Amino acid sequence: MAVTSADVAHASGVSRTTVSYVLNDRSGTTISDATRRRVLEAAEQLGYAPSAAARTLRRGRSDLVLVVLPHWPIGPVIDTLLDHLADDLAERGMSVLVHHGRGPRPLSDLWRVVTPHTVVGLTAFAPQDVQSMRRAGIRVVGTRIDAGHPDATSYAVSQRRIGQMQVEHLVARGRRRIGWAGPTDSRLAEFSEPRLVGVTEACTAAGLPAPVVATLELEVASARSAATIWHDAGADAVAAYNDDVALAVLAGLRAEGMAVPTDVAVIGVDDTPAARLACPALSTISQSIELQAAYLAAATIAALDGDDGRLPWPPDVLAVVGRDST
Amino acid sequence: MAVTSADVAHASGVSRTTVSYVLNDRSGTTISDATRRRVLEAAEQLGYAPSAAARTLRRGRSDLVLVVLPHWPIGPVIDTLLDHLADDLAERGMSVLVHHGRGPRPLSDLWRVVTPHTVVGLTAFAPQDVQSMRRAGIRVVGTRIDAGHPDATSYAVSQRRIGQMQVEHLVARGRRRIGWAGPTDSRLAEFSEPRLVGVTEACTAAGLPAPVVATLELEVASARSAATIWHDAGADAVAAYNDDVALAVLAGLRAEGMAVPTDVAVIGVDDTPAARLACPALSTISQSIELQAAYLAAATIAALDGDDGRLPWPPDVLAVVGRDST
DNA sequence: CTGAAAGCGCTTACAG
DNA sequence: CTGAAAGCGCTTACAG
């Protein structure tokens, strides 16, 4: 049914060898312009496209970059990243395909199904997965996330540093008793734990007691309970896991009659549109998505060229955005 | 380097035929239990995994379902959908891979690179793309989005109906002059246009004048300008493209000193967490993501079984969520 | 300058 | 009950 290179060869009156040479623009061969044109025309007219399976089988490697996404909810960072990656790789004739790291199926099955050229992990791989992929000749690029480890990074950003910056900002605004608002979604532990470590460290460094920890759902009722906890502990500031949680914190404090920032200051992470539209406008930590995405894309390209995917650390991508809530 | 079926055959002292029969559990063949066990053990020990490329080449079709995502920003709907799909398909030995419909590369290239079994489009395909895929023996499942057409649907939901429901709710609460808050992101036109059509239709049906249309960025300044437009036109209600835009509308009205809902009622779409945490809590249209995702997953499965992906229309997934903002 | 032939790793009629 | 052989569509030394 499908058109093969043999059909093209037949139509243009040459051998499959010649067809392959012409279509792959093989250097070192000299093919007459007339022949070349005839082959190209026939291929065009027949709508010929080489079989990826055959090509992969022959070459032992495909033109595919497989991006493995983590199980946690993805946001605009990933979107931007995939954009960058797809653009940059398309120029090199490679395609990007994404696997959402969910469902019961282990990763090992997947990379065998597509024999990708490179696998880019936005989540940590099991060491044995990495080993088998490498053994199969597949390049593996990672982002060095080590769940639970205080130095865990993702997109080349230190989660711990984020927590530190939140507290440093709050302390600079004169706050002395810090609360922590964590998410209840356990899939986010990979991020929230190192951030809390950072918050705690910064408190210690500033000579403050350990943070008052509370977790909350994105609902008013849940946020009210958390507000009570902070109130009872005399907290005058709350560092939230991210802007979504911070919005819930604002709602909870409001419902409990605590004024922001007079009674309690609040700071989030991510600088989402909703953050600057909140009342009061929410202070936050911005992450420079573009820079991170460009960095990861560059790391992937480097891996394609034979490096191991390690690049010099990117420029500072974190910044405090001070608004009315602190 | 990689382990092949020949290695397994050698290790277990049988032919490749037998290895294939055992590993694929071929019915109609009778292989002694002893042989079977020997083959299985050898495969296990050698870490054998069949080459996808060879298998695909031989069978003319892979075990891959390719989901093509649209260019617009994706949200939790897609996440849930992919979860469902991956789970359901894994049971049938198929893997789900996702392509973000961005970047300069045309779709045509991509499906040739992976020879998927089925392509699921969450965005409209070019007719010629569909044709060439079908001709190549690939199943194509769509969601019947026809950009610009008032009956455009996505995830089996009528966008037009969403707009209608917003206005019906506002009218039920006694509002008579409706404003529309559209997004500036042109990638969203596929959704926003049919929704505005629905809003306009419902206004007409209720004997009201056409809606006062404004578009806005997710920023206070932009939202203030929009608020001025509605104010000058005497609007007493605003239907927003979604909750994000509605949040901006709230901020803009607040900045302009207009009270919600006293002066102006506001309703969004999506029922995001931020909507119920806003002040005042935002009325919205909820979409029952779970139902939609399950529906699409079922349609894909049906396509696998040879149907054309059309299922009976799903149960009503839209509902008005009335809160303080109306 | 171009072609015949081998081989990538698999599955599957067809023999035995 | 098991094996030798063909063939999926491609690329690439190797001959001419």
Image (cartoon, coloured by chain):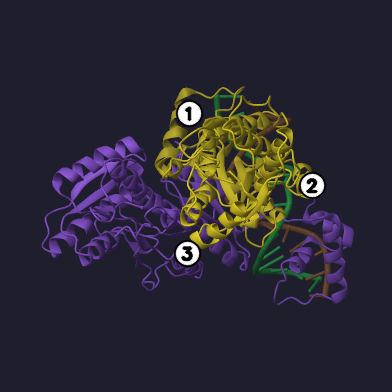
Chain colours: A purple, B yellow, C brown, D green
Residue B242 location in percent, x, y? 56, 45
Residue A267 location in percent, x, y? 31, 57
Q: CA distance from mark 1 to mark 2?
A: 48 Å
The chain identifier of the residue carrying mark 1 reads: B
Residue B256 location in percent, x, y? 50, 56
The image shows residue B320, relative to residue A301, as above or below, that is above
Quarter of the rendering occupied by the N terminus of chain A: top right
Q: Nearer the viewer, residue A28 or B120?
A: B120
Q: Which residue is mark 3?
A: A293
Q: Which residue is mark 1?
A: B36
The chain identifier of the residue carrying mark 2 reads: B
Q: Which residue is mark 2?
A: B127
The chain identifier of the residue carrying mark 3 reads: A
Q: Is there a contact, CB below 8 Å, between mark 1 and mark 2?
A: no
A204 sits to left or right of B204: left
Q: Nearer the viewer, residue B102 or D5?
A: B102
Residue mark closest to the camera, 1 vs 2: 2
Q: Residue at image x 65%, y 57%?
A: B186
Q: CA distance from mark 1 to mark 3?
A: 49 Å
The answer to whether one can see residue A60 in this image is: no
In terms of secondary structure, where does tag 2 sit? Answer: helix
| Disc 1 and disc 2 on one polypeptide chain | yes
B10 sits to left or right of A45: left
Q: Residue at image x 57%, y 67%?
A: A88
What is the three-letter code of the residue carrying label 3?
Answer: Ala
Residue mark closest to the camera, 1 vs 3: 3
What is the three-letter code of the residue carrying label 2?
Answer: Pro
